[in-house]
Amino acid sequence: MRINFGELVIGDIAKEYLQRVIDKNWASEGDNVKEFEEEFAAHFGYKHAIATSSGTDANICSCAALYDFGAKRGDEIITPALCFVATPNSILAAGFIPKFVDIELENLNIDPHKIEAAITDRTKAIMVVHTMGKPCDMDSILKIAQKYDLMVIEDACEAHGATYKGKVVGTIGDMGTFSFYTAHQIVCGEGGIVATDDDEIADVVRSVKSHGRPPDSIYFDFQRVGFNSKMNDMEAALGLEGIELFEKNFDKRKNNLYKLLELTKELSDYCYFIKEEEHEKISPHAFPLVLKDEKYDRDRLYNYLESKGIQCKTLFGSLPTQHKAFKFLNYQSGQFPVAEYVGKNGLHFGMHQYINDDDLVYISDSLKGYFKYF
Ligand SMILES: Cc1ncc(COP(=O)(O)O)c(C=O)c1O
């Protein structure tokens, strides 16, 4: 018995698109990528979608695009203290400094009340993350961004198709990024997209993801610093299938999420669970939980679930204070109390479309089996 975090199944639609690659003997960014970009933009209602080789690259390109809009190397980008590490890593890779802000326990997203205190005259953007597919409080974030003239990047890598007050996440701010790694809803193996409704931003991101050339050029005219962040046609083949099956998979995952929340509701004395509010549609990325007391011992629960074949991940940890990688930024333990609590007491596991009802009962029985000793 093994319930993995995510799974990739390559179906007939993807195989047809893969056949195109074989017939053409061409795998670099080509027809499949173009179609994937168009279909993704049309499906979610974005004006532009620019494919990249990963969600991390989508993040790097979206940050690097800020140089065309007044940012200078070494400027700061505000970002949550707790999220997948690719977000602050990308900020650094693009030449900026991440300015970490604590999160809220109820939603695991950046705490808008703490953003203003982190703004300096070098702040150029707020890069939020819709962690676990739950949208951030975008009204408050946009209000602060407007007040201080900051751009807003939404890392929506875990939030394909999530909505906030009727708007699909990704272009509520200036740009949104997506990942198509196997854990996510649309899967390419590896892959990403930057979405934007702004023509000028779209041109800059297209340029940045191809060495800073003019958009869609392959010649040696380098107008800005850029990278090779292009997606390839084999990856896009898988993603095209993912778009066709999106609604079906989204509904299955959402049903799974709701069924497991129902099956585990008696554990609400022990755990905080994810909650969908009226103004939003959560994208069912995974099943997160945070222990209500340290005595329930997250590491023990983690090992227990793993021993039952349920693949677990922690809830990332407080990046500035619980991970060595960001030590050089000199944050102090205790500066991000919520992120640090969640980092010590949270975990998540998969809720994908290949998990069936028996698996859900098995997961809930396993969880109940653990807590019955308390
Ligand atoms: C919030 C977030 N941002 C960025 C990424 C990076 O995406 P990728 O793994 O495609 O580079 C991920 C990956 O899972 C993610 O969850």
Image (tube, helix red, strand yellow):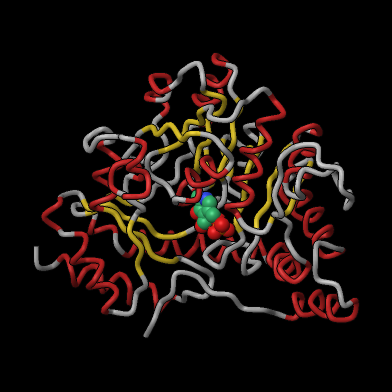
319 vs 178, left or right, is left
- 191 w.r.t. 223: above or below: below
On the image, the x and y values in percent for residue 135 come to: 51, 41
In the image, taking residue 70 as reference, residue 121 lies left or right, namely: left
On the image, which quarter does residue 223 sit in? Answer: top right
Q: Is residue 200 left or right of residue 305?
A: right
User: Is residue 364 rendered to the left or right of residue 15?
Assistant: left
| Residue located 63% across and 33% down the image | 172
Q: How many marks?
A: 0
Which residue is drawn at the image coordinates 61% and 38% (left, top)? 63
What residue appears at the point 46 percent right and 35 percent down from the top-left corner? 98
Q: Is residue 284 above or below residue 16?
A: above
Quadrant into which the N terminus falls: bottom left
Residue lying at the far bottom of the rendered structure? 1
Q: Position of residue 343 (x, y in %)?
A: 28, 49
Picture coordinates of residue 53, whole percent (x, y): 67, 59
Is residue 13 among what the camera can see?
yes
> Is residue 158 in view from this perspective?
no
Quarter that holds the C terminus: bottom left
Q: Residue at x 19, y 54 (%)?
A: 270
Residue 330 position, x and y percent, is: 31, 35
Tell me if residue 345 comes above or below residue 66 in the rendering: below
Of residue 360 and residue 196, the one placed in the foreground of this image is: 196
**Who is closer to the viewer here, 315 or 206?**
206
